């Protein structure tokens, strides 16, 4: 049993990312003490939301220096390791987001601790991470041994449940802001229009049935109205219609949104490998024998070029 768990907090525009709350709910099984490890100095609003979900201690990792130091994943990882030592943590939970994939394995490597990424569940008592293998055909239970164990959690895989507690804030002064390490930070570039694919609650995705890149504007219009992200099949990416960052599947993003709207996507095993954990699948397809229809919760049998404009008009 892990007694003290550190949860790596990701933020967006100064607020805790929604997908952190499911991860905190997962980490709060049993009676483990929960430590939120924050890279930005937490304000009152942030500590209130973290307390709402069961965080006992908020640790300001003390990276309040320049952005170069704060964003550098190498420095972040060393700051986390210092907190692990300081608070004697025996488990670390982070998200399997782009940011988390850059950080969580570094933390595990520095601690020489075992790691499972992209977990859809964790049994804390048994130290087991559940993650998909072989293109999603198998859900493997991977049991970790060691003094400290590290889990990367798939965003949105766990439903967040509020569990308010009293929380206290502690600050570390790590003075790690000078980039002494192998990675330097050249500044970030964010596409502020786009909702992150791996963390989106709703995804509208297109495949070969979209016919060309221009037609993807139908999906972008639809996504904008629903605060959704746009995804794509590999065919749409290979054809150059949309960038690779939008690919969902075995060799693309693994997503767990509440709703996945698949337009003109047949439903290959490789595509399902990336989205089968969606809570609701809606297919739009002209072929009633498409696997996407067979595996959907709801489907519309018809031409997406009629259905999407109508959907946009309704929205
Ligand atoms: C090693 C490997 C890794 C792979 N990794 C991935 C991956 O990560 N992600 C991925 O997606 N694929 C991946 N693939 C490719 C995968 O096998 C399929 O080729 C691909 O998913 C098919 O894409 P699609 O569904 O868009 O195209 P298709 O299979 O051609 O399906 C197009 C669908 O659109 C429908 N359609 C056509 N016109 C319309 C219309 N007007 N209205 C409504 N419906 C219409 C058709 O009925 C059909 O069902 C991988 C393959 C391999 C071998």
Image: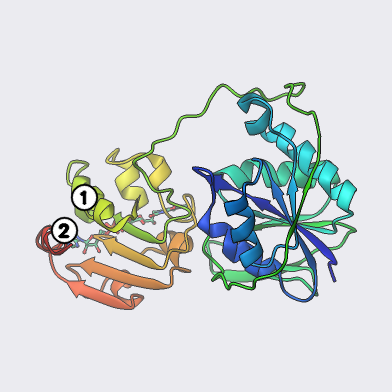
Image spot of residue 166 (x, y percent): 72, 66
Q: Is residue 184 visible?
A: yes
Image spot of residue 67 (x, y percent): 61, 27
Q: Residue 248's quadrant in the figure?
A: bottom left
Mark 2, residues whose alpha carbon is within 10 Å: few (<14), some, or many (≥20)? some
**Which residue is pictured at 56% across the width and 46% down the height?**
11
Horizontal side of residue 189 vs 73, given as left or right = left
Image spot of residue 66 (x, y percent): 65, 25
Question: Quarter of the image containing the C terminus?
Answer: bottom left
Mark 1, secondary structure of its residue: helix
Q: Residue 302's quadrant in the figure?
A: bottom left
- Where 41 falls versus 51 (above or below)? above
Q: Which residue is mark 1?
A: 221
Mark 2, secondary structure of its residue: helix
In terms of depth relative to the viewer, which is nearer, 161 or 283?
161
Horizontal side of residue 213 vs 252, given as left or right = left
**Which residue is pictured at 71% across the width and 37% down the height?**
76
User: Which quarter is ligand 1 in?
Assistant: bottom left
Q: CA distance from mark 2 to mark 1?
A: 7 Å
Q: Which residue is mark 2?
A: 312
- Where 285 falls versus 222 (above or below)? below
Residue at the farthest front position = 44
Q: Is residue 118 visible?
A: no
């Amino acid at each position: 049993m892990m007694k003290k768990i550190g949860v790596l907090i990701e933020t967006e525009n100064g607020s805790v990312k929604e997908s952190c709350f499911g991860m905190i709910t997962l980490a709060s099984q049993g009676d483990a003490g929960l430590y939120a490890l924050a890279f930005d100095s937490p304000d009152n609003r942030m500590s209130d939301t973290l307390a709402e979900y069961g965080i006992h201690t908020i640790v300001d990792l003390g990276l309040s220096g320049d952005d170069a130091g704060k964003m550098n994943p190498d420095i972040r990882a060393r700051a986390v390791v210092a907190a692990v030592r300081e608070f004697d943590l025996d488990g670390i939970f982070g998200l399997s987001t782009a940011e988390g994939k850059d950080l969580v394995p570094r933390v595990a490597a520095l601690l020489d601790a075992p790691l499972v990424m992209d977990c859809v569940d964790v049994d804390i008592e048994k130290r087991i991470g559940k993650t998909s293998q072989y293109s999603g055909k198998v859900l493997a239970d991977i049991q970790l041994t060691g003094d400290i164990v590290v889990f990367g959690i798939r965003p949105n895989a766990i439903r967040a449940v509020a569990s308010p507690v009293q929380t206290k804030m502690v600050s570390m002064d790590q003075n790690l802001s000078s980039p002494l390490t192998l990675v330097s930070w050249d500044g970030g570039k964010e596409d502020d229009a786009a909702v992150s694919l791996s963390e989106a609650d709703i995804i509208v995705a297109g495949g070969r049935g979209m016919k060309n890149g221009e037609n993807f504007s139908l999906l972008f219009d639809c996504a904008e109205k629903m605060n959704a992200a746009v995804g794509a099949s590999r065919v749409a990416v290979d054809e150059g219609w949309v960038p690779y960052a939008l690919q969902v599947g075995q060799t693309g993003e693994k997503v767990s949104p509440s709703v996945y709207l698949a337009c003109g996507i047949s439903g290959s095993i490789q595509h399902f490998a990336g989205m089968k954990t969606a809570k609701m699948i809606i297919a739009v397809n002209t072929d009633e024998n498409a696997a996407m229809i067979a595996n959907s919760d709801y489907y519309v049998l018809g031409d997406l070029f009629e259905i999407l404009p109508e959907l946009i008009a309704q929205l």
